[in-house]
């Protein structure tokens, strides 16, 4: 029987276990350069016993930033600063992927360089507020991307992937979940386009397919993962029947030989099983555990064959040595939900955590 503590080969790399540290945006890249800091190097190195670390969301371009003090991978200074993080993780024997996250309409002009505004597949305003340096602000109506701007955004993802490898990362995870730009193209309430980038299923999956293809061509599929969250309503997304869209997406991506698919699971376990059957490669699951954080019981998903790897978020914040604690069945420090930026919404773990 396979367990979470057995090694696994991921993209040609032998990982010590099947336990993944999930991406958790932390807003610790202080300063105008949006560059990672020494504190961030310490934070990731402390958690290097994870089979795989996926970083906080990293914007692939200046226009992709949606939260204060999040880091980028689009300038030479950022590339150089990330090297201290990857070196620190590698010294501890860890493997680390950079998560590339363009937030799209989730953001605010005050977070962007002068003259830029949030963008999206369609000019549909998200309900709710975003955190800024001046406090919470209402979302603004985003600018609808033109064909040329879509092409440039795809190129930005590929360039950021190349920068990640230059910075010493072992690979990248493309963030196609949680209501950010790629998810906005997938969802019918945020993509109202009638051109080749919208409309029916084939049009709505096109941006995700082309971003993933471009990143794969830039650095190789064995260094690329994709994160999805079918049916996740976070950031004002509506997907009433996501199965058709995501099965079509997986069918288009299956030939790219990606390192993994990372599912942020919703309450529909039947959909998880369908996507597991549809995906030919490594299947990573961030389990749906609302209202609790993911705990040791999730390891059973690997033993049952429902997942190849399990992603933990909040529990990794409170327990930097989480794999050892899981192997010993505890004890576990309890995460403090009050320290999560926006709360531990629906049990998902992709939110800026203000501790550490």
Image: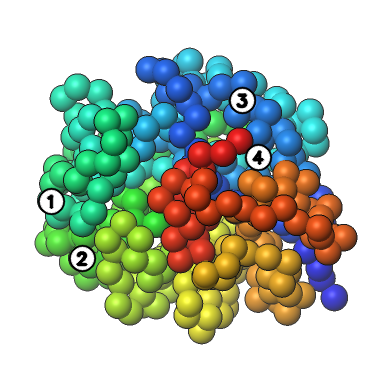
Check disc 3: other Cα within 10 Å, few if <14, some if 14-19, many if 20+. Answer: few
Residue at the (47%, 16%) spot, across then down: 76
Mark in front: 3 vs 4: 3
Q: Is residue 172 visible?
A: no
Image coordinates of residue 244 in percent, x first then y, are 36, 77
Q: Residues within 10 Å of mark 2 (few under 14, many from 20)?
A: some
| Real-space Cα separation, disc 3 to disc 1, in angstroms | 38 Å
Q: Residue furthest right?
A: 328
N-terminal of the two: label 1 or label 2?
1
Closer to the eye: label 2 or 3:
3
Q: Is residue 79 left or right of residue 197?
A: right
* Marks 3 and 1, the one that precedes in the sequence: 3
Task: Depth check: give the residue in front, 235 or 52.
Answer: 235
Q: Which residue is mark 1?
A: 123
Disc 3 target residue: 39
Q: CA distance from mark 1 to mark 2?
A: 11 Å
Residue 96 disc label: 4
Q: Residue at x 25, y 48 (%)?
A: 129
1 lies above or below 349? below
Which quadrant is home to the N terminus?
Answer: bottom right
Residue 43: quarter of image: top right
Is 249 left or right of 87, judged from the image as shown?
left
How far from the left and from the top, in percent, is residue 103? 33, 44
Check contact, mark 2 vs mark 3: CB within 8 A: no
**For the residue labelled by badge 2, is the local secondary structure a helix, a strand or a loop?**
loop
Question: In the structure shown, which secondary structural element does the residue marked by tag 4 occupy?
Answer: strand
Q: Quadrant of the C terminus?
A: top right
Residue at 47% across / 72% down in the picture? 266
Secondary structure under the numbered disc 1 in the rendered image: loop
Of label 2 and label 3, which has the lower sequence position? 3
**Residue 19 in sight here:** yes
């Amino acid at each position: 029987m396979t367990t979470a503590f057995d090694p696994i080969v991921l993209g040609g790399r032998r990982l010590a276990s099947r336990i993944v540290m999930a991406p958790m945006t932390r807003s610790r890249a202080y300063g105008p350069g949006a560059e990672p800091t020494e504190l961030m190097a310490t934070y990731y190195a402390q958690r290097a016993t994870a089979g795989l670390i996926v970083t906080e969301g990293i914007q692939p371009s200046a226009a992709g930033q949606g939260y204060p003090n999040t880091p980028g991978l689009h300038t030479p200074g950022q590339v150089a600063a990330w090297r201290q993080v990857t070196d620190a993780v590698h010294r501890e024997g860890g493997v680390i992927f950079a998560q590339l996250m363009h937030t799209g309409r989730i953001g605010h002009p005050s977070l962007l360089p002068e003259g830029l505004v949030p963008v999206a597949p369609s000019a549909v305003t998200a309900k709710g507020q975003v955190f800024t340096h001046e406090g919470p602000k209402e979302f603004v109506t985003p600018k609808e991307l033109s064909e040329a701007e879509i092409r440039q955004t795809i190129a930005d993802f590929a360039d950021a992937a190349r920068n990640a490898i230059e910075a010493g990362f072992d690979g990248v995870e493309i963030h196609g979940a949680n209501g950010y730009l790629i998810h906005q193209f997938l969802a019918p309430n945020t993509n109202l386009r009638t051109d080749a980038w919208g409309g029916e299923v084939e049009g709505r999956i096109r941006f995700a397919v082309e971003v993933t293809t471009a990143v794969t061509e830039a650095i190789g599929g064995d260094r690329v993962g994709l994160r999805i969250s079918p049916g996740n309503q976070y950031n004002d997304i509506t997907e009433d029947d996501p199965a058709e869209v995501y099965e079509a997406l997986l069918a288009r991506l299956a030939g790219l030989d990606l390192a993994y698919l990372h599912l942020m699971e919703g309450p529909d376990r039947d959909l998880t099983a369908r996507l597991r059957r549809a995906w030919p490669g490594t299947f990573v699951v961030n389990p749906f555990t609302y209202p609790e954080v993911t705990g040791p019981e999730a390891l059973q998903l690997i033993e049952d064959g429902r997942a190849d790897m399990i992603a933990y978020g909040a529990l990794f914040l409170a327990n930097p040595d989480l794999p050892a604690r899981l192997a010993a069945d505890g004890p576990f420090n309890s995460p403090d939900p009050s320290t999560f930026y926006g709360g531990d919404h629906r049990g998902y773990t992709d939110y800026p955590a203000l501790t550490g």
